[in-house]
Image (cartoon, rainbow, N blue to C red):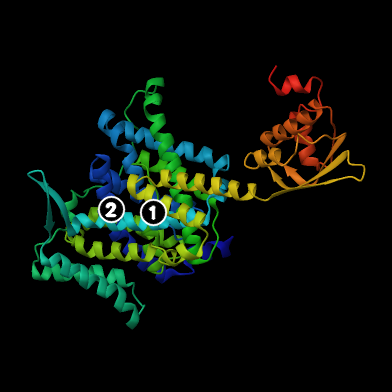
């Protein structure tokens, strides 16, 4: 156990501390922005980010992954805050944590097995696009003036700072990797902006930073069935989206670090963290792929990086708010553009021609749905469903049915090879010639497998159609699993088979 603690906490002491500083600085404007999206005070997002990061640092199943308040979760809270207020949001956050712990015990994490590589690639690419799009307001954009679109641009200082910041981020590692280049970029650009007195947007312009530490509190709401009906739908949505994004992020960080993680433990940790956030006056959150990528690329690998980010975030906004508020947003935009570029799977462009069309379509559909709706869960759901449909269609094609007539000319033997289920059931029935005048038909299933009741129903149709014309049918070679399904659900071997098959 001591070896495990040393490996997860102190094996990369310097790298984790420096990476945690970078993440903490990048978390501040995001937590404030997500609070604004949800319609609550900035301190709600900042307290949540602190609490969730600290709790998951100790309880999480994926060392090096950053969890905090997120935009995907904030979007789900808008109507609840607008219609019922902050206290109901805190109660919903507590219930979200409870639901996530329950989901951990019923092993929701195993559902990640059904998420294909194409879906994960699409998820990553979509998130990279969303991260980049989130930076555009800081760089200018389209606004409507007198009913017509007009392009607004920021001052040249903003673009200069972003370009210089990106230059530091990408060129400094060529000289030294002693200090994370994003941290150097933030410090240098802040110093330049303060020294030159540049008129650029800063972190302080995002919202008022809290001036006190969070305190323990319980939501001031009535504990009755009406309250539960109000918060339960929101909490269930938050729980599902939070775990989905956390598990996807954990899988991505696994790939980035070439290590494995405990997904079930991570589900429990997310639940505990959200309960803690609700009790500290914070909103629900989950893992953040952007901040996790920043952490990994800055050298963070252990639990200490996440703990450092959470603790330092709170200390900076409470005790160093005067300095933190001076950080130019352009410096953080440069870091997030780096994250966007580093997150996007650029090889996926070349793979569009190399990979099967179905895989490329799944990836593109996931990207399009996520970017269009800003709903990560919906995009992943569409990708998983498409993957399932394409897989079922592909497996359904692996079915061969051959036949031969005996020397007497009155007995035909059909040999079935492959998988029979809902996708291939029609092809199975169509392979038999019911018009041929035969005394007996033998259906050999030694090399076939029946998977579901649709396949059993198809077998019923074949047998009953032959018997209805006076042909004797013998079914041989069922494996144990298929035979069990036939015994339970088939009607062709039951009395009055024709009537039962026709629903009478």
The foreground one among 322 and 344 is: 344
Of the 4 image quadrants, the one containing the N terminus is bottom right
- The correct choice, above or below, for 321 with respect to 389 in the image is below
**Number of numbered discs overlaid on the protein picture:** 2
Which residue is labeled 1 in the image? 288
* Mark 1: few/some/many CA within 10 Å (<14, 14-19, 20+): many
Residue 30 is marked as: 2
The structure residue drawn at horizontal position 60% and vertical position 50%, both measured from the top left corner, is 394
* Residue 128 in picture, x, y percent from top left: 35, 58
Pointer 1 or 2: first along the chain: 2
Depth check: 303 or 23 in front? 23
Closest to the observer: 115 or 194? 115
- Count residues near mark 2 (Cα–Cα under 10 Å), then give few for <14, some for 14-19, many for 20+: many
Residues at marks 1 and 2 touching, judged by CB atoms closer than 8 Å: yes
**Left or right placement of residue 435 versus residue 349 in this view:** right
Secondary-structure class at tag 1: loop
Look at the image and tell me whether residue 86 can be seen. Answer: no
In the image, taking residue 3 as reference, residue 63 lies left or right, namely left
Picture quadrant of residue 479: top right
Quadrant where the C terminus lies?
Answer: top right
Query: Residue at left 52%, top 66%?
Result: 258
Q: Nearer the viewer, residue 147 or 84?
A: 147
Horizontal arrangement in the rendering, residue 204 relative to residue 452 (left or right): left
Could you say which disc has been placed on residue 118 in the image?
A: none
Asked if 319 appears above or below 502 in the picture, the reply is below
In x, y percent, where is residue 132? 29, 58
Quarter occupied by residue 333: bottom left
The x and y percentages for residue 385 are 51, 44
Left or right: where does residue 344 sit relative to residue 394?
left
């Amino acid at each position: 156990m001591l070896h495990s603690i040393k490996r997860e906490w102190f094996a990369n002491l310097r790298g984790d501390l420096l990476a945690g500083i970078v993440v903490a600085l990048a978390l501040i404007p995001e937590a404030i922005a997500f609070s604004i999206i949800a319609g609550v005070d900035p301190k709600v997002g900042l307290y949540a980010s602190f609490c969730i990061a600290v709790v998951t640092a100790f309880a999480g199943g994926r060392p090096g992954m950053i969890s905090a308040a997120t935009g995907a979760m904030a979007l789900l809270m808008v109507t609840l805050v607008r219609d019922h207020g902050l206290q109901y949001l805190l109660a919903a956050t507590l219930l979200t944590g409870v639901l996530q712990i329950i989901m951990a015990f019923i092993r929701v994490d195993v559902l990640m097995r059904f998420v294909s590589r194409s879906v994960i690639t699409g998820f990553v690419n979509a998130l990279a696009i969303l991260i980049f799009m989130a930076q555009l307001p800081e760089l200018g954009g389209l606004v409507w003036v007198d009913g017509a679109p007009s392009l607004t641009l920021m001052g040249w200082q903003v673009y200069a700072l972003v370009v210089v910041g990106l230059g530091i981020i990408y060129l400094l590692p060529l000289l030294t990797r002693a200090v994370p280049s994003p941290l150097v970029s933030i410090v240098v650009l802040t110093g330049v902006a303060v020294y030159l007195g540049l008129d650029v947007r800063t972190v302080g312009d995002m919202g008022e930073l809290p001036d006190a530490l969070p305190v323990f509190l319980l939501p001031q709401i009535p504990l009755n069935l009406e309250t539960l009906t109000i918060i339960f739908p929101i909490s269930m949505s938050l729980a599902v989206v939070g775990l989905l994004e956390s598990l996807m992020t954990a899988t991505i960080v696994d790939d980035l670090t070439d290590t494995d993680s405990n997904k079930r433990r991570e589900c429990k940790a997310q639940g505990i963290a959200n309960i803690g956030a609700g009790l500290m006056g914070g909103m629900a959150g989950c893992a953040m792929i952007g901040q996790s990528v920043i952490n990994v690329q800055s050298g963070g690998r252990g639990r200490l990086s996440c703990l450092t980010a959470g603790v330092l975030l709170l200390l900076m906004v409470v005790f160093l708010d005067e300095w933190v508020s001076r950080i130019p947003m352009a410096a953080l935009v440069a870091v997030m553009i780096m994250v966007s570029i580093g997150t996007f799977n650029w090889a996926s462009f070349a793979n569009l021609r190399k990979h099967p069309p179905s895989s490329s379509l799944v990836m593109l559909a996931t990207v399009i749905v996520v970017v269009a709706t800003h709903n990560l869960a919906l995009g992943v759901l569409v990708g998983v469903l498409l993957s399932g449909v394409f897989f079922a269609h592909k497996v359904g094609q692996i079915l061969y049915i051959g036949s031969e007539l005996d020397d007497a000319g009155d007995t035909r033997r059909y040999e079935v090879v492959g998988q029979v289920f809902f996708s291939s059931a029609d092809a199975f029935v169509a392979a038999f010639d019911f018009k041929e005048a035969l005394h007996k038909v033998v259906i050999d299933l030694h090399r076939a497998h029946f998977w579901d009741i649709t396949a059993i129903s198809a077998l019923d149709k074949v047998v009953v159609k032959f018997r209805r014309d006076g042909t004797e049918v013998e079914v041989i070679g069922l494996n144990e699993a298929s035979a069990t399904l036939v015994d339970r659900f088939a009607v062709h071997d039951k009395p009055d088979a024709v009537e039962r098959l026709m629903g009478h």
